[in-house]
Amino acid sequence: MILSDNETKVDMLNNRAIAKTVANVIRDCDDRPISIGVHGDWGAGKSSILVMVEDELLSKTDQDNNVVCIRFNGWQHQGFEDAKIALMSAIVSELSRNQKVSDKAKDALKKLWKNINWLSVAKAAGSAAFSLATGLPPIGLLNNLMDGLKGTEYREIPINSEICKSAKIGSVIADADVIISLNHFKGHEQAGFGGALKNIGMGSASRGGKLDLHSSSKPEINKDNCTGCHQCVKNCNYGAINLNENKKAVINYDICVGCGQCIAVCQYDAAQPVWDNASEIMNKKIAEYTFALLKNKPNFHVNFIMDVSPDCDCWSSNDMPLVPNIGIAASFDPVALDHASADLVTQAPAIKGNILNPEGEHDLVGEDKFHHVHPNTNWMVGLDHAEKIGLGNKSYELIVV
Ligand code: SF4
Ligand code: SF4
């Protein structure tokens, strides 16, 4: 006999008693909030229990009790922020639609809906909300597909610069008539900080271009530290790292793109960056790629100097911001903009309790916070180079509005 894998109200595993108990606990809690977890091995019938709980609560005898059951699959949402926002959106939209909810409650829901952080929703919803609202192509989709499904759709833009003779830019963004960049300004473990230049140069590079940009910064494995925990192997998206017969990690440098993910996940300081002039070269290449994209195109740039995290947004975790929120800076010159943004972070005090100022004794006002967090990086080299190749000008006038 083959049974379907779908959840069911038909109780073949004697789970109805559990469902009744859960339903009774929910009924008895009146208006007090309550959380109940249903735990069990795969196949134990957890999903069916939830269906039976719903059946119990919505049964005829309970028709007047104003219970609303909302289904939400948390596993479909990656990351805590993502799931939290998705859960809020699901609850608010389901309640808004529900006939049982009073008009007063619907008014309260409308206010709550307005207060939802739409930037986070856009992030959580893969920018579908942004797309629906503006009619523009979804940002996430654009980013993922700008160099085609296989990374082969790019334009090779000749620049004949100091390091790169050409830049491989994703064709979708290379074909844009105007570039407007919106950038979260934060620390970066290889560039020092990530602002307009890093977001444009790295972000618009095709897969091959990203390989070029990172290729001087591939990590190495300190075999004495390596415990063979396998984390780097599981997290390398390129299949470039494996354990050898001695349970030590080994990198295949023919495949490795130098993304640094293995460094981020290694808890034992075994996967380490190779610091010589990697940061300087990468920052110069980023400037050259940015130049390749922006030359001959009208462009404008906005840096959000808020939640200035020590590391890049790529990681699934991060630390407290380095400094209090500073604001939003904008300029037609991405070099001036990044320089001004970095100066503003330098002049701000380090937040007490963060990685730079754990006890509140060192506010580091006037010091380069990014260099303190990532001492092997040198972001000024990138700005100097950007100015030298004609991308922009480091000098700026800050106009506060
Ligand atoms: S994560 Fe670090 S310790 Fe674990 S296998 Fe990889 S290099 Fe070794
Ligand atoms: S740097 Fe990236 S591509 Fe290279 S081994 Fe580490 S995780 Fe894999």
Image (cartoon, rainbow, N blue to C red):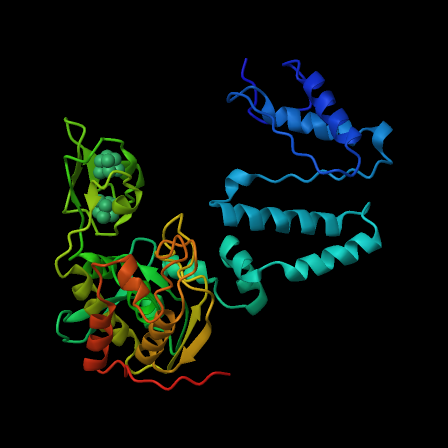
| Nearest the eye: 48 or 365 | 365
- In the picture, measured across the screen, residue 240 lies left or right of residue 328, that is left
Check the image and report above or below for 14 versus 252.
Answer: above
Percent x, y for residue 236? Answer: 28, 43
- In the picture, measured across the screen, residue 109 lies left or right of residue 130, that is right
Percent x, y for residue 8? Answer: 65, 24
Check the image and report above or below for 303 versus 149.
Answer: below
Considering every residue shown, the one lying at the far front of the view is 361
Percent x, y for residue 320? Answer: 43, 54
Percent x, y for residue 279? Answer: 20, 62
The residue depicted at 86 percent of the width and 28 percent of the height is 61
Check the image and report above or below for 341 versus 202.
Answer: below
| Nearest the eye: 375 or 266 | 375
- In the picture, measured across the screen, residue 124 lies left or right of residue 63, that is left
In the figure, residue 144 lies in which quadrant?
bottom left
In the picture, which quadrant includes the N terminus?
top right
In the figure, residue 342 lies in which quadrant?
bottom left
The residue depicted at 37 percent of the width and 69 percent of the height is 345
